[in-house]
Amino acid sequence: MRLLYESVFPVLWIGFLLYWNVMAAQTKSTERMEPTASRVLRALVFLAAIYLLCAPWQFAWLNTHLWQTTALIFWVGAGITLAGLLFCVWARVHLGQNWSRSVTIKQDHELIVTGPYSLVRHPIYTGLFVAFIGTALVIGQVRAVVAYAMIVLSLWYKLRLEEKWMRAQFGAKYEEYSSHVSAVVPFVF
């Protein structure tokens, strides 16, 4: 049973990352991409957050338990993580060749407003926020909360840049879309 508990989250996240990397090859050519420094900084923050999630720290306060992880919390967290990752996959499939890891404008870029994009403008970010909440819930330590905050800040910066570029690319069409569809939380924000 211990092996099952220890393997659930690595299987979920590694499976997701493998899928993500395989699908990255099937995209349109890039016309414009955010600066390298921006991409590198975001990647470093993300890697630091993932390291915080994966490895107990020598600083005792980071390992302080905020709640105990029971079997119920473990499986609820696993379910939340899986739901978030599946939402990301749905959004990625729906974006098709318009997707990219970085903020970009693709050749013949299309504004996608159907499927998960009819619920939120940034469903991949929504899915990641949900998936990381599930993982942090199971870890139940200060380091998980710190890592989650780092992920939110990193994606928030990317979201703001993406919004700016989409407004510049699609103008009134994007303004209309954004006036009816929330950014990351349906009907809220």
Image (spheres, rainbow, N blue to C red):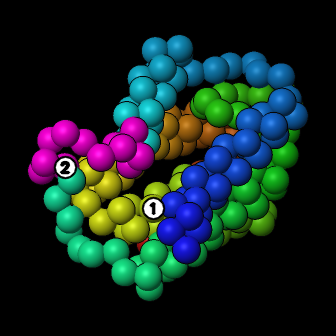
Q: Residue 135 — which label? A: 1
Give left or right: position of 63 versus 135. left
Residue name at image x 25 percent, y 60 percent: 141
Residue 57 among those drawn in magenta: yes
| Magenta-tinted stretch | 51-62
Quadrant assignment for the N terminus: bottom right
Q: Evaluate whether residue 109 shows in this view.
A: no
Q: Residue 62 — which label? A: 2
N-terminal of the two: label 1 or label 2? 2
- Among the 4 quarters of the image, the one containing residue 165: top right
Look at the picture and state if 181 lies above or below 155.
below
The residue tagged with tag 2: helix, strand or loop?
helix
Residue name at image x 13 percent, y 48 percent: 60
Q: Position of residue 69 (x, y in %)?
A: 34, 75
Residue name at image x 71 percent, y 28 percent: 105
28 or 79: nearer the viewer = 79
Three-letter residue code for mark 2: Leu
Residue name at image x 20 percent, y 68 percent: 66
Quadrant assignment for the C terminus: bottom left
